[in-house]
Image: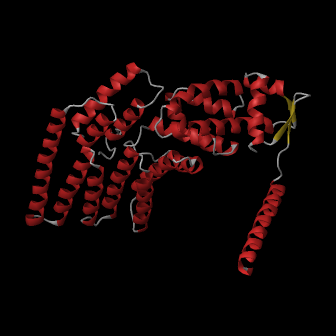
Amino acid sequence: MNGGEDGKQERHLVLAHKLFLLSHPDVDDLSKVALRTEVLDAVKSDDMAPLFESLVAAGVLEPDAALLAEMRGRIEEEIRKLDDKIADAEENLGESEVREAHLAKSLYFVRVGEKEKALEQLKVTEGKTVAVGQKMDLVFYTLQIGFFHMDFDLISKSIDKAKKLFEEGGDWERKNRLKVYEALYFMATRNFKKAASLFLDSTSTFTTYELFPYDTFVFYTVLTSIISLDRVSLKQKVVDSPEILAVISKVPHLSEFLNSLYNCQYKSFFAAFSGLTEQIKLDRYLQPHFRYYMREVRIVVYSQFLESYKSVTMEAMAAAFGVTVDFIDQELSRFIAAGKLHCKIDKVAGVLETNRPDARNAFYQATIKQGDFLLNRIQKLSRVIDL
């Protein structure tokens, strides 16, 4: 796995995205034929025998015993050579050469897709590593394995480990890289608020091209920020950010999506939003949260519209969004019932009345509720003790 120094996405993560698209119901059969060929080429070029076997078992690729035997033969031969280098380094050379030989074996296991062996060998390499920066690089390799397999437990533990390493020292460049890895982890596990904060911290220091290109980074930053930031912060950190402005137009519909929301041009916003849905659906990190994200964005935009009024007719709101009154009625009633929008519908008059909650009153209600809960728990406990 490369570290992204050459500005290219790590090739196994490119492959992971292709595998995701192959299993996606919205990708047409013709595209899948091309994808299958690309996946097979990638598997062959890196001798990824374990992945080839699992893809054959899943019916994604055709069985090919001769190819599998060839790959296995090359792997055995290469591992023999790597073991010889390790033995030679241990007998005749210094500690740094021993470490390099172990690292080469780790990276070979990564390359051929032997996940467990790679993780084991990376641990061995870590035992031979003194410098904090080099230990951090090993964590980045582990994180890339985690993102390839979407192994969130491995990712989470590796991020914690990296943070502990930084307490011993570590340079800013690696610290900044870790922020993007952590942001991606938060986004992939539906913590959009934390993801947005870390993505925004990295807009001027982004170097993690091994994860994704800069325009994808901007796509994630804008998407997570829109549902996480208030209007003032959105303007300051995203709408006016020179780094984001430089590339936002490269992502179809993204500029219209952001600016129409900020400028309250709701018809344009909905048009841009529907244009973006396909990109969100076809992203392996965002797709599991597609419905949740769609809901959160609509809550943001409806709340923003209603904030300007004490009461407004359903017809006026429907016209502003370029949809029917029935659609607005259905949408809002669902969000109001879930407690996500603070307004009520007067169906007879066809009017929406907003009832913005007072923060102090909300705090008072929450305190009462928690107090009742605590008293109930104490009563239950006292009954148990009396017995």
Camera sees residue 243? no
Residue 356 falls left or right of residue 280: right
**Residue at x 8% of width, y 66% of height:** 91
Q: Quadrant of the N terminus?
A: top left
Residue 52 falls left or right of residue 179: left
Residue 53 or residue 325, whichever sits in front: 53
**Position of 41 relative to 212 (above/below):** above
**Residue at x 16% of width, y 45% of height:** 75
Indicate the position of residue 13 as horizontal and vertical percent values. Answer: 36, 40
Which residue of the protein is positioned furthest toward the right in this rendering?
349
Indicate the position of residue 148 as horizontal and vertical percent values. Answer: 37, 44
**Position of 153 relative to 41 (above/below):** below
Indicate the position of residue 109 as horizontal and vertical percent values. Answer: 24, 49
Residue 8 or residue 271, whichever sits in front: 271
Camera sees residue 190? yes
Q: Quadrant of residue 42?
A: top left
Residue 136 or residue 117, whichever sits in front: 117
Residue 123 or residue 171, whichever sits in front: 123
Indicate the position of residue 20 as horizontal and vertical percent values. Answer: 41, 35
Q: Quadrant of residue 120?
A: bottom left
